[in-house]
Every structure is written in structure tokens, then in C-alpha cells.
Amino acid sequence: MWKRYLLALILTLGIFGSAFYMEYRLDEQRVAMIRASENDISIDILSSQTQFELLGNLECGTTTQSTALSSELDTLGSRLSVAENNLGSKNDEVVSLKKQYSLLEIKDFILAQQIAAKCHQKPVFVLYFYSNAGDCPDCSREGDVLTYLRQQYPALRVYAFDYHLDLSALRTLSSIHELKEQLPALIINNRQPVYGFKTLDDVEALIPELKATATSTKKTATSSVTR
């Protein structure tokens, strides 16, 4: 009888052992994929930094290069979000990458403002401060609103920052605008911060410049088609 129990025990241990091994292998594969993604993100960050240097003396006739750079930053941000979701917001590597990405966003914001002033453009800038620490239930919804608006208005530039990220440049940016810890928060074209969740209609009402940029974009597209 005891042999039967022993055999059952061995079989049970074998099944559990196989399950744990498979789970371990799957975790290893997930981590490997995330590490590869992190390496790609690091390379993209270095590439973007180099582009900032190249665009320093940008001529007004080549402003589309700056737009392309902002588009690359958007893609980079999406990839970073995936890494954050997989590894967690407190993971040291994720935090380091978020800091680098936030610095790139600030650089892009400064560069875009310089280009706008030099080339007499009127883009719309939104600094969006959020938190994913569980203390901002409306931040996710606000992010969805801004994502939709960016798709509708190509001239709209949104820079998203984790308010709790320990980064001196980010603290300076918050200090310049006298930002309070009331999230979500929006700073539109360097005006006073706007706090709390804003619907799509609310944000469009706060940014009347958007319709002007949409009209300008349509005229440009029509002119290009005509040519």
C-alpha cells in the first residue's frame, strides 16, 4: 500500500515540478523580451539626443524634421509604457528609462518653442502631469482624452510627465509653473495650470487655438494636393 502512496506522491511532485519549470521558463522568456526592449529603448534615447544636437541650427524650411522627432518620441513613450506595465513602475530600470525619456520630452518642448518663435509658428503645447501611484483615479481617463486630441490635431504637442518622478529638471519645470499636487494637471501654452479631470469638450474649450491649427493644416494639405 505504501508503495502506491509513494508512487502517487512522486507523480504529484513531478507534475508540480514540471508546472513550476514551465512557468520559470516562461518568466525567463518574458524577462528576456523586456530586456531586449529596454536595450532598444536605450538606443532610441541616444539617437534622439543626437537628433536634438543636429536640429539645433534647424532652418524654417525643414521644420518637418522636428515633427518627425516628436513622432519618434511618441513611439518611444508607448514602448516605455509596455516595459513599465511588465516590470512595474518601481522597477529600477524602468525608473531610469522614464527619467531619460522625461529629459528628452523637456528638450523637445524647449526645441519646439525655439523653432516656433524663430519660424513664426503657432503650435499648441500641453504639459500633462499624471501619477500612476494609485492616487489619481482620473489620470488614465485624462490620458485617453489627450491621446484622442493628438490624433485629431497634428499641431498639438502633449508632453506627459510622472509627477512623482524624482528628477531635478522635472521639479524645476513644476516650480516654474507653480504646479500643485492636484492631479491630473494640464499646463496649456505656458498658461496657469488647470487641475482635475477634463472631458474632451472641456479641453477643446480650454484650447481655442486648436481649431486654428486644424484650419491651417487643412489649407496646407489642400495646397500640397493642388501642387
Image (spheres, rainbow, N blue to C red):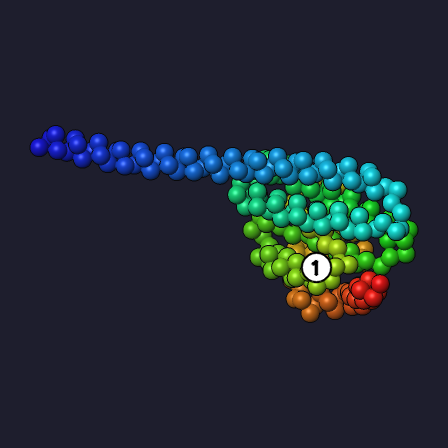
Residue at 69 percent of width and 60 percent of height:
151
Looking at the rendered structure, the kind of residue marked 1 is Arg
- List x then y, in percent, for residue 81: 60, 47
Residue 12 located left or right of residue 139: left
Q: Quadrant of the N terminus?
A: top left
Residue identified by numbered label 1: 150
Around disc 1, counting alpha carbons within 10 Å, would you say few (fewer than 14), some (14 to 19), or many (20 or more)? Answer: some
Q: Quadrant of residue 188?
A: bottom right
Q: Is residue 7 visible?
A: yes
Residue at 74 percent of width and 40 percent of height:
48
Q: Is residue 209 visible?
A: no
- List x then y, in percent, for residue 123: 81, 58
Residue at 12 percent of width and 33 percent of height:
4
Total marks in image:
1
Q: Nearer the viewer, residue 73 or 109?
A: 73
- SS for dot 1: helix
- List x then y, in percent, for residue 50: 77, 37
Q: Nearer the viewer, residue 2 or 219?
A: 219
Residue 185 located left or right of residue 30: right
- List x then y, in percent, for residue 116: 86, 53
